[in-house]
Image (cartoon, rainbow, N blue to C red):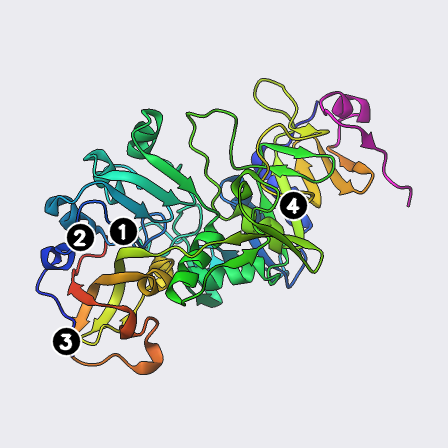
Amino acid sequence: MKSLNDNELAARVARDIPDGSYVNLGIGKPTHVSAFVPEGREVIYHSENGILGVGPTPPEGQEDVELIDASKRFVTAAPGAAYFEHADSFAMMRGGHIDIAVLGAYQVAENGDLANWATLDEKFPPAVGGAMDLVVGVPTILVMMRHVNRDGSPKLLRQCTYPLTGLGVVSRVYTDLVVLDVTPQGFRLVELTPGNSFDEVQALTDATILPPIPT
Amino acid sequence: MDKRLPDLAAAVAPITDGSVVMIGGFGSSGIPFGLIEALLEQGATGLTIISNNAGAGETGIATLLKAGRVAKVICSYPRSPGSIWFERRFEAGEIGLEVVPQGTLAERIRAAGSGLGGFFTPTGYGTLLAQGKETRIIDGVGHVLEAPLRADFALLRAERADKWGNLSFHATARNFNPVMATAARYSVAEVRHLSAEPLDPEHVVTPGIFVQGVVEYGVRP
């Protein structure tokens, strides 16, 4: 099986971020997407802790400890950036003003249900952050994640077993093995990571993958 | 009118055992580290802390957790890297936790500060966090009724203040500070620069009416 590494996966997601969009990148791996958006596209990044226009990481020694993103990494303010407080920040998210959000996930179901905030382990404190607000307010929710868990168990399922973040909210899933659209009929193949076969990917997925619609 | 306080100890003196305390900040930005340290020294215990995170490492809210002063945390994200004191207290069953979606947390605080009885939000509809709450379909979309969230005290961090209690902020240190200022009976801010001269009214983010005390704490952590 050909598996994309984290940077290759971020670059694959970045290809689908259009010029002129307002984008929220979830904490963790999704934050790497911005580094791979093709030259010539202006994308404005929102971070829920109060900045629209997140710029690149500052050079070492020039960090401002009070200028961070939602992953708590030091960032800069891009030209045209704005700062704001939390109630305004979530008005942008819930109010439909952000175009695209890229999130990580524990599980995605074939009906677009997303589970990414809590597990079934009661000793492991649940942490929702802004995920539930994003999924109800942002029209396009892209998920990027490994195709299977470390133990090989599937993350793409007929039905999520972990507590849900949102119901029927995921538009498209990017894994290291495949890109899938969530459609009213279920997961539909967009593309295989070159070198993988449909049958191999299907075998690692606990839901039916529909073939691409012929173009 | 002069809301300037002599020191951090004076700012936290009114906080009593069992108080509900909002603490501004997100990650390590905009956290009133000086006021938290003064609260630790002051000794109030059995506190309910409302904040986005539950502290990290051995600083800020984590020091209150470590010292056993916190009975309950209301937050959106208690699992930041290095939140060891929260995790220890949680695993041992020594602390209550109410997880609230971050936007709902901000808006519940805003509702309290704005005199509203709550609001319907689509956030969390159909999830565990909506269990037991009233729901309604509005324009075809499921919504959850969320209640206002108020506090006895709010501990805030700002960049500048004047003696009237007007506040302005720096970069992403703003976060929950302005909204929390509105929702507590007594809101106090540690500020990097405190001036007897008025702030430019065009640059005031939090109007002084929401702030009961300001104290200079020049350190930018």
Question: Numbered disc 4: what chain?
Answer: A
Q: Which mark is residue B15?
A: 2
Q: Which of the pair B173/A30 is nearer the observer? A: B173
Question: Numbered disc 3: what chain?
Answer: B
Q: Nearer the viewer, mark 3 or mark 2?
A: 2
Looking at the image, residue A155 sits to the left or right of residue B190; the answer is right
> Which image quarter holds the N terminus of chain B?
bottom left
Residue A124 position (above or below residue B155): above
Q: Are marks 3 and 4 on the same chain?
A: no
Q: Nearer the viewer, mark 1 or mark 4?
A: 1
Q: Nearer the viewer, mark 3 or mark 4?
A: 3
Q: Are marks 1 and 4 on the same chain?
A: no
- Distance of label 1 from label 2 (alpha carbons): 8 Å
What residue do we see at 35% from left, 61% from top?
B174
Q: Which residue is mark 4?
A: A142
Kind of residue at badge 4: Leu
Mark 3 or mark 1, which has the lower sequence index?
A: 3
Residue A69 position (above or below residue A210): below
Q: Which of the pair B171/A110 is nearer the observer? A: A110
**What span is in magenta?**
A194-215
Kind of residue at badge 1: Val
- Distance of label 3 from label 2 (alpha carbons): 21 Å
Q: Which of the pair B2/A209 is nearer the observer? A: B2
Q: Which mark is residue B2?
A: 3
Question: Numbered disc 1: what chain?
Answer: B
Q: Which residue is mark 1?
A: B21
Magenta-span inclusion, residue A200: yes
The crowd level at tag 1 (other Cα within 10 Å; few <14, some 14-19, many 20+) is many
Instruction: Classify residue B113 by image quadrant.
Output: bottom left
Q: Secondary structure at mark 4?
A: strand
Task: Tell whether label 2 touches label 3 (CB within 8 Å).
Answer: no
